[in-house]
């Protein structure tokens, strides 16, 4: 396409310069041979098309910067009985580090002493922190919520999990080949044919004895009418209007490639936490043991209101009445909480902390928080992650056009429960970020287009590696930066609307290409002079430029029709 632009504008400018010289020499008939404006308009329209195209391309460097900001700048190094704050780059394998409450784990390693609750959601996507004690593996970028631990550094620098995530995202983004546009494919055949016709036109008119100027005028007219301004606008204008329509419906397309590719996707891979589920714990039951249910919930909520642990925060938030006064409150890092209510000791936490050994009547995927009051276990609060109701409907609709899988860093039992409820085709559990990307690669290996739908930092590599990455806006900024499409309303059914728009936009692009070439097919033979011998009709390059401009107007007008499309929320192959 650029070849035709260069030849058309170049020929117009060169011939205009020739005409200018002839006018200076007194040959006024060459006034009609000035096409400087034509060359300017051609370049302006092509540049406008390129601008629209570049405007919609995603900027991925921000995702890398935000990930790098997760890495702490310093670490506390233990030397004999003293502590020293050092740049994290100076930490070596085998060093003993101290991580206090509120600090970020500086490198990958193993806890050797102390207890703490560690938020690993940036890696696993799971909202419930782990209880870390001696022997627990911890990763750089995880946050110590409470307690103080000592850890032994095992992987530092570029070997840490978070450093590998950054590298994987960079590799995925740089290896994502741009889609060969239909316009470029057609141009590959069209350009040589047009050049051949222009050269043949010049030779034929010279051989017929009509002179150099007449032959040159005819061949320039061929190049000008064939100059594909409309072709340059066909794709970006449709994508711009389609993207705008999508935004009105809560779907943000960050690139034209995503809008083109989504319609071809036949495998859809969902992250679990924060995508299929809401990614936040919810109280699903209050289970008293020989005790009043309301009183149990009130005691638990009163204790929880003093704690910063995510599970405790959920219990406190969901209790809607007055609370007891709590005295002598204490958080025991990585284990539970204690305090005094109405003069009696309360302990609250895991079954291990409370020393509860009986069988529990709860479902897989549910987490119990036990309450002990005055030395007796009075019951437990059951928490679980809530399924997004739009997930089930969306999965059923997507199964009409392809396969649906679920990926999660959560344990196998929880994954099985959620996978069965949502009815996905298959699932992968206990999967870390680099493994997620490997699974996406395996699914792509059969030359099938794959979409990844996620929300967390742990999904960012897979989002970048997939043919189309789809992020929900309630997720992390890094996930949204890595993705090609963002669902602004967190409604998974908007994926269906996005596919509808992808289909409609590609159909519109094909219509645009038809109109872009329609004028060429009609105009090129006339520009070459096929009607000159029998009827004396020739196509002045100025008229050719006008026809070319009109084809551009037709393409833009057709693209604007996308604004009126009605989305039905249903799609099939």
Image: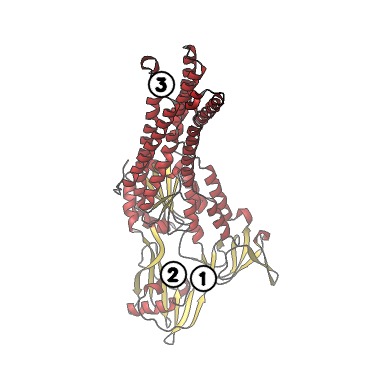
* Residue designated by label 3: 538
In this orientation, which residue lies closer to the viewer: 518 or 544? 544
Residue 311 tag number? 2
Judging from the image, the colouring scheme is secondary structure
Q: Earlier in the sequence, mark 3 or mark 1?
A: 1
In this orientation, which residue lies closer to the viewer: 125 or 510? 510
Lateral position of residue 202 relative to residue 89, left or right = left
**567, above or below 19, in the image:** below
Between disc 2 and disc 3, the foreground one is: 3
Q: Is residue 199 visible?
A: no
- Examine the image and state in which quarter residue 377 appears: bottom left
Q: Position of residue 202 (x, y in %)?
A: 49, 18
In terms of secondary structure, where does tag 1 sit? loop
Q: Given the current orientation, which residue lies at the most extreme bottom position?
A: 343
* Residue designated by label 1: 334
Q: Given the current orientation, which residue lies at the most extreme top position?
A: 208
Number of dots carrying numbers: 3
**254, above or below 76, in the image:** above
Q: Is residue 23 visible?
A: yes
Q: Residue at x 37, y 72 (%)?
A: 318
Residue 8 tag number? none
Q: Position of residue 441 (x, y in %)?
A: 48, 44
Q: Residue at x 64, y 65 (%)?
A: 75
Between disc 3 and disc 1, the foreground one is: 3
Spatial CA span between label 2 and label 3: 82 Å
Q: Residue at x 39, y 71 (%)?
A: 358
Spatial CA span between label 3 and label 1: 87 Å
């Amino acid at each position: 396409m650029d070849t035709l632009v260069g030849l058309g504008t170049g020929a117009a400018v060169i011939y205009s310069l020739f005409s200018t010289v002839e006018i200076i020499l007194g040959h006024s008939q060459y006034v009609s041979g000035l096409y400087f404006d034509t060359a300017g308009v051609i370049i302006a329209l092509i540049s406008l098309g390129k601008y629209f195209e570049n405007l919609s391309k995603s900027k991925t460097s921000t995702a890398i910067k935000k990930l790098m900001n997760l890495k702490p700048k310093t670490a506390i190094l233990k030397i004999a009985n003293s502590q020293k704050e050092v740049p994290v780059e100076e930490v070596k394998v085998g060093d003993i580090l101290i991580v206090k409450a509120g600090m970020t784990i500086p490198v990958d390693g193993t806890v050797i002493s102390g207890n703490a609750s560690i938020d690993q959601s940036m890696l696993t996507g799971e909202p419930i922190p782990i209880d870390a004690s001696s022997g627990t593996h911890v990763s750089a970028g995880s946050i110590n919520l409470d307690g103080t631990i000592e850890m032994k550094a095992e992987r530092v620098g570029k070997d840490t999990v978070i450093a590998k995530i950054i590298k994987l995202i960079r590799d995925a983004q740089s290896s994502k080949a741009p889609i060969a546009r239909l316009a470029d494919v057609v141009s590959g055949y069209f350009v040589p044919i047009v050049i051949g016709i222009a050269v043949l036109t010049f030779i034929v008119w010279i051989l017929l004895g009509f002179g150099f100027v007449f032959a040159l005028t005819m061949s320039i007219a061929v190049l000008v009418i064939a100059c594909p301004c409309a072709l340059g606008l066909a794709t970006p204008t449709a994508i711009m209007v389609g993207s705008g329509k999508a935004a009105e419906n809560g779907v943000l397309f960050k690139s034209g490639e995503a809008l083109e590719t989504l319609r071809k996707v036949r495998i859809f891979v969902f992250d679990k936490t924060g995508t299929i589920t809401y990614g936040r714990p919810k109280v699903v039951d209050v289970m008293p043991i020989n005790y009043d249910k309301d009183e149990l919930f009130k005691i638990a909520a009163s204790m929880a209101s003093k704690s910063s642990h995510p599970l405790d925060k959920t219990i406190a938030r969901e209790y809607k009445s007055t609370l007891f006064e709590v005295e002598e409150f204490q958080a025991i890092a990585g284990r539970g909480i204690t305090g005094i209510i109405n003069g009696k000791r309360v302990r609250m936490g895991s079954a291990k902390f409370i020393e509860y050994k009986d069988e529990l009547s709860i479902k897989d995927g549910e987490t119990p928080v036990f309450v002990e009051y005055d030395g007796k276990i009075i019951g437990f609060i059951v928490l679980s992650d809530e399924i997004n109701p739009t997930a089930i409907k969306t999965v059923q609709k997507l199964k009409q056009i392809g396969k649906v899988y679920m990926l999660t860093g959560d344990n196998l039992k929880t994954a099985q429960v959620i996978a069965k409820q949502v009815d996905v085709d298959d699932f992968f559990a206990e999967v870390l970020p680099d493994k997620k990307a490997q699974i996406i690669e395996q699914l792509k290996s059969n030359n099938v287009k794959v979409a990844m739908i996620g929300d967390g930092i742990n999904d960012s590599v897979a989002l970048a590696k997939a043919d189309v990455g789809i992020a929900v806006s309630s997720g992390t900024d890094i996930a949204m930066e890595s993705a090609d499409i963002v669902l602004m309303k967190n409604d998974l059914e908007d994926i269906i609307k996005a596919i509808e728009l992808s289909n409609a936009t590609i159909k519109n692009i094909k219509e645009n290409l038809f109109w872009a070439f329609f004028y060429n097919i009609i105009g090129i033979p006339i520009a070459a002079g096929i009607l000159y011998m029998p009827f004396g009709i020739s196509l002045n390059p100025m008229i050719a430029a006008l026809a070319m401009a009109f084809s551009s107007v037709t393409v833009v007008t057709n693209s604007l029709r996308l604004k009126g499309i009605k989305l039905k929320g249903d799609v099939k192959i």
